[in-house]
């Protein structure tokens, strides 16, 4: 009822204003129409100039006032490596469009004042002017050419498929949710077929493909900082858009047409919160109605949004994205259970149901060859490749039987792919026990790997260097059992490839 009354009042005011205008027109005709028009033109010209000044002040002042809320300004720098390029492109575009914006608005309102109606003034009609045509054609064309070239440069830098080692995840949009799939320990996403999609298999994963067996579907999106991420994007029903605004990446999710983008987050969630801590705007409560709620800077999170209007539930596709350190990510990943183990293993959908655990284990090990070879896709001196599947019996330098699969893969790399490559085989331990004993054990293990490569692969001894570092170069903290297991490792460090 209140809304109806407000609407009627506004309508009544408009009617009154129109009637007053009509009365003023009639009075002008009765008095002196020419003088009334002249006086009205003078007033309108002044009003236009006042509006011009006020409008320009408002534009500048509002941008300054909200600078700490806008992406790309204040504390909201890009949180990805390539986002800096896009921010520079936007700023360059803003400079040119800003100049045009200011000049055209000044001309628009100034001309209304300068060329207002005056008795006896005649308009000058120009049907054609080569100088003006050249001016307003050549300058915009030159500016557009510059912006297009700069934009293409940015596009190539951002969208070129990376040759670096990367982690790939898959995102599939549906009304109204994002489903996320991670590759698991082998860092390889398994094959999928849309015809297999059902309630137990939302991605339509091909369970005959053993790369699928460790893929998992987390309830949250967690990514490691300073790691190149490739997002494979699909859609199940209608058009969606996978948008990570803080990282300056977005891409349509199109049914039947997979897309992707690559980015590298450079700031963890906690680091970004610390950036916001000293900013006055973020010192307010996240929930003003709850005095116990955290401050805005404490409640900050990166977000995934759908940037398409995909239906009534469009808003519910918002997801929190958490960027963490590599150590935190590794710990989180170990807590995840594969979708195969959760829903398929042992059921009628399980094609491996009749296979023994030993067959499954050997099949998975053989599939790790592809991931291992991908580690050598681009080789540089100093590059370190971790030999995750080279393991030793506890407290000794005796290789576990399954280690031969990874070492045989390494032999193939050193003989067929890079026959001139020289490498260092580095052994590491945790900090448990005597440092001198740890040093000796790591050296013995490195030598055991070297001996295997020479004996079983015919690799020349002068291409191999064995070095034990004991507990002097931990990959992570030794304070937990998981950390100590992470530090007990063997690495292959490229010395040269000549």
Image: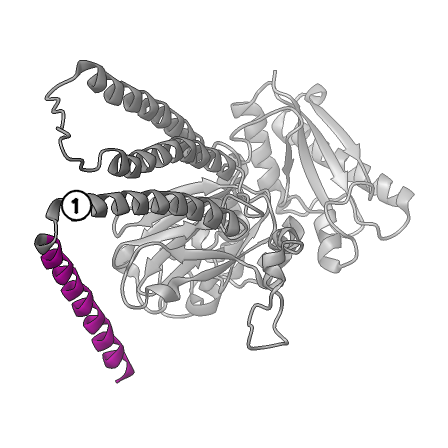
Residue 445, magenta (yes or no): no
Q: Residue at x 64, y 49 (%)?
A: 326
Which residue extends farthest front?
Answer: 31
Q: In screen coordinates, is 21 left or right of 453?
A: left
Q: Secondary structure at mark 1?
A: helix
Q: Residue at x 11, y 24 (%)?
A: 125
How packed mark 1 is, by other alpha carbons closer than 10 Å (few <14, some 14-19, many 20 or more), is few
Expressed as whole percent of the image width and height from the top left, the position of residue 304 reads 44, 56
- Give residue 335's quadrant in the image: bottom right
Name above or below for residue 341 compared with residue 215.
below
| Magenta-tinted stretch | 1-28
From the viewer's side, name the closer residue of 350 and 41. 41
Q: In screen coordinates, is 272 left or right of 218?
A: right
Expressed as whole percent of the image width and height from the top left, the position of residue 249 reads 43, 44
Q: Count the numbered circles shown.
A: 1
Expressed as whole percent of the image width and height from the top left, the position of residue 318 reads 42, 62
Name above or below for residue 178 compared with residue 91.
below
State the predominant SS element of the stretch in magenta: helix
From the viewer's side, name the closer residue of 207 and 435. 435
Q: Which residue is mark 1?
A: 35
Name above or below for residue 224 compared with residue 109.
below
Expressed as whole percent of the image width and height from the top left, the position of residue 347 reads 40, 70
Q: Residue at x 60, y 68 (%)?
A: 285
- Give residue 447's quadrant in the image: top right
């Amino acid at each position: 009822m209140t809304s109806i009354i407000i609407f009627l009042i506004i309508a009544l005011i408009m009617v009154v204003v129109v009637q007053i205008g009509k009365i003023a027109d009639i009075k002008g005709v009765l008095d002196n129409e020419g003088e009334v028009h002249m006086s009205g033109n003078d007033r309108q010209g002044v009003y236009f100039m006042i509006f011009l000044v006020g409008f320009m002040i408002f534009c500048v002042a509002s941008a300054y006032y909200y600078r700490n809320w806008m992406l790309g300004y204040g504390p909201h720098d890009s949180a990805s490596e390539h986002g800096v390029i896009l921010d520079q492109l936007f700023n360059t575009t803003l400079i040119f469009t800003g100049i045009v914006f200011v000049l055209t608005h000044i001309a628009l309102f100034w001309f209304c004042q300068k060329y207002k109606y005056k008795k006896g003034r005649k308009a000058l009609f120009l049907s054609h002017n080569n100088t003006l045509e050249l001016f307003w054609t050549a300058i915009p064309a030159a500016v557009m050419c510059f912006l297009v070239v700069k934009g293409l440069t940015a596009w190539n830098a951002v969208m070129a498929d990376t040759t670096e080692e990367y982690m790939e995840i898959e995102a599939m949009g549906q009304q109204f949710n994002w489903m996320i799939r991670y590759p698991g320990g082998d860092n390889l996403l398994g094959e999928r077929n849309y015809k297999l999609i059902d309630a137990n298999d939302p991605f339509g994963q091909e369970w005959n493909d053993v790369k699928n067996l460790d893929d998992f579907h987390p309830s949250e999106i967690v990514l490691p900082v300073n790691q190149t991420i490739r997002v494979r994007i699909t859609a199940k029903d209608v058009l969606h858009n996978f948008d990570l605004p803080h990282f300056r990446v977005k891409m349509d999710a199109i049914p039947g047409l997979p897309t992707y983008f690559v980015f590298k987050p450079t700031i963890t969630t906690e680091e970004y919160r610390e950036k916001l801590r000293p900013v006055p705007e973020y010192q307010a409560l996240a929930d003003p109605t709850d005095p116990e709620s955290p401050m805005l800077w404490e409640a900050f999170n990166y977000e995934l949004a759908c940037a398409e209007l995909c239906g009534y539930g469009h808003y519910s596709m918002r997801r929190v994205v958490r960027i963490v350190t590599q150590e935190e990510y590794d710990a989180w990943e170990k807590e995840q259970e594969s979708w195969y183990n959760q829903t398929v293993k042992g059921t009628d959908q399980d094609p491996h149901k009749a296979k023994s655990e030993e067959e499954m284990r050997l099949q998975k090990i053989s599939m790790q060859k592809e991931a291992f070879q991908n580690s050598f896709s681009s080789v540089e001196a100093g590059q370190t490749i971790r030999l995750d599947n080279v393991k030793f019996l506890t407290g000794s330098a005796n290789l576990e039987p399954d280690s031969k699969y990874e070492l045989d893969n390494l032999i193939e790399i050193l003989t067929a792919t890079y026959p001139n490559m020289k490498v260092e085989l580095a052994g590491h331990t945790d900090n448990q026990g005597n440092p001198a004993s740890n040093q000796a054990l790591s050296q013995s293990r490195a030598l055991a790997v070297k001996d295997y490569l020479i004996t079983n692969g015919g690799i020349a001894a002068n291409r191999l260097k064995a070095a034990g570092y004991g507990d002097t170069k931990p990959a992570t903290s030794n304070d937990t059992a998981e950390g100590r297991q992470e530090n007990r490792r063997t690495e292959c460090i490229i010395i040269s490839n000549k």
